[in-house]
Image (cartoon, rainbow, N blue to C red):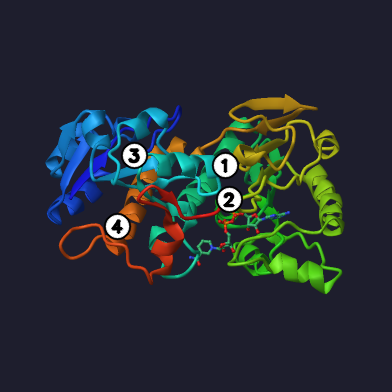
Amino acid sequence: MQVGIPRETLPGETRVAATPETVKKLAQAGHRVLVERGAGTAARYPDADYEKAGAELTDADAALGSELVLKVRRPDAAELGRMKPGAALLGMLDPFDADGLKALAGAGLTAFALEAAPRTTRAQSLDVLSSQANLAGYKAVLLATQYYGRIFPMMMTAAGTLKAARVVVLGAGVAGLQAIATARRLGAVVEASDVRPAAREQVESLGGKFIDVPYETDEEREIAEGVGGYARPMPAAWMARQAALVAERCKQADIVITTALIPGRPAPTLIQPDTVAGMKPGSVIVDLAVERGGNCPLSVPGEVVERDGVTLVGLSNLPALLATDASALYARNVLDFLKLVIDAEGRLALPEDDDIVKACLVCKDGQVLRSA
Ligand code: NAD
């Protein structure tokens, strides 16, 4: 099969969907691999390495005109116009965006949105949300260190003792847990909150303190347990109790990292403007949910702003700031997914009883298969 890897065109997107390592495996499996010149440059994978791995270097038209196109982000209208009806597309395709899916279907594609994979043990090796969120959580802490005018660990020096930074992490999923681990490694004192009761043990196992917002009704606990490991919107009464506790913890904090998301919905508001006003001058908030509306309404997407002496870091797409590793993990996720949809003869096959394929298949032969 002819497999194309175009250069990503979305501004700021530095990742690439295949690396020389994964291209080599595809070429060894007998596929003809076309890589657009410069596709890996921003992620520090030179063209020569792709060539050595068995790829042909081409222009964008040839790569996008392949039978199977591997992407990081959803193609825009110009890219879709260069793809062939009947071709297959694999990438992070925003499965909750109905108009976006319609555009893919309109181009006559069979499309797999990798973000829609179930969070099961079998799907772990192709879980792009996890591989990328993990890096985002790590980078969020490093960004916090950059904008914080003090240090993270306690330091006893001849000139006196410096206190350890206090870090609050809101949302203890994949990104939040990595943020906790990274902040702890740097010597910070860490507290974290999540709606899901299972998060407590995970936070504590990383040396963090769990901010306990008790459930007052069975309904609250049932909603908090979520579906398929994902959170659901909590009742207003629980959110109000959480907001009060969070406001109190944020007053004591030096750094707040927010990662709370609910699939297919705007991010929940966890830090109100008056909570920001009550924080210490010099504190830093890194809002990882900024692309989905933010966990703090004062965060500005793509910007670092200061309010009431608090720096709000709203930079988006943090995995793109670690493009080499982010691409390496993403490309391996892609390769693992391909094992499910390429048969022994090297052709695209859609196993109907495979739960992972079923979940990711958002368009088939020009039809949208998923209600966004
Ligand atoms: P996510 O990115 O959708 O959300 C991030 C976190 O925000 C979640 O932990 C969520 O519970 C939390 N959150 C939502 N509303 C909140 C609120 N009001 N206050 C505080 N926190 C709030 O989640 P994710 O990181 O993708 O992980 C979702 C779940 O999937 C987790 O349980 C994770 O352990 C699980 N998971 C399982 C697998 C697997 O089994 N293969 C892989 C990855 C993740």
Tag 2: amino acid? Ala
Front tag of 3 and 1:
3
- Give the quadrant of residue 69: top left
Tag 3: amino acid? Val
Q: Quadrant of ligand 1?
A: bottom right
**In x, y percent, where is residue 150?**
66, 35
Front tag of 1 and 4:
4
Q: Height in image: 218 above or below 343?
A: below
Tag 4: amino acid? Leu
Residue wearing tag 2:
179
**In x, y percent, where is residue 178?**
55, 54
Is 193 left or right of 183, judged from the image as shown?
Answer: right
Q: Distance between the residues labelled 1 and 4?
A: 31 Å
Ligand 1 within 8 Å of disc 4? The answer is no
> Mark 3 or 1 closer to N-term?
3
Front tag of 3 and 4:
4
Ligand 1 within 8 Å of disc 1? The answer is no
Q: Height in image: 257 above or below 283?
A: below
> Mark 3 or 2 closer to N-term?
3
Q: Distance between the residues labelled 1 and 2?
A: 7 Å
Q: Tell me, yes or no, if residue 128 can be seen here.
A: no
Residue wearing tag 4:
338
Residues under numbered marks 1 and 2 in contact, where contact means CB atoms less than 8 Å apart: yes
Badge 2 element = helix
> Mark 1 or 2 closer to N-term?
1
- Compare residues 212 and 130 and report the one nearer the observer: 130
Q: Which mark is residue 16?
A: 3
Residue at x 18% of width, y 44% of height: 33
Q: Residue 140 carries which label?
A: 1
Residue at x 55% of width, y 54% of height: 371
Q: Residues within 10 Å of mark 2 (few under 14, many from 20)?
A: many
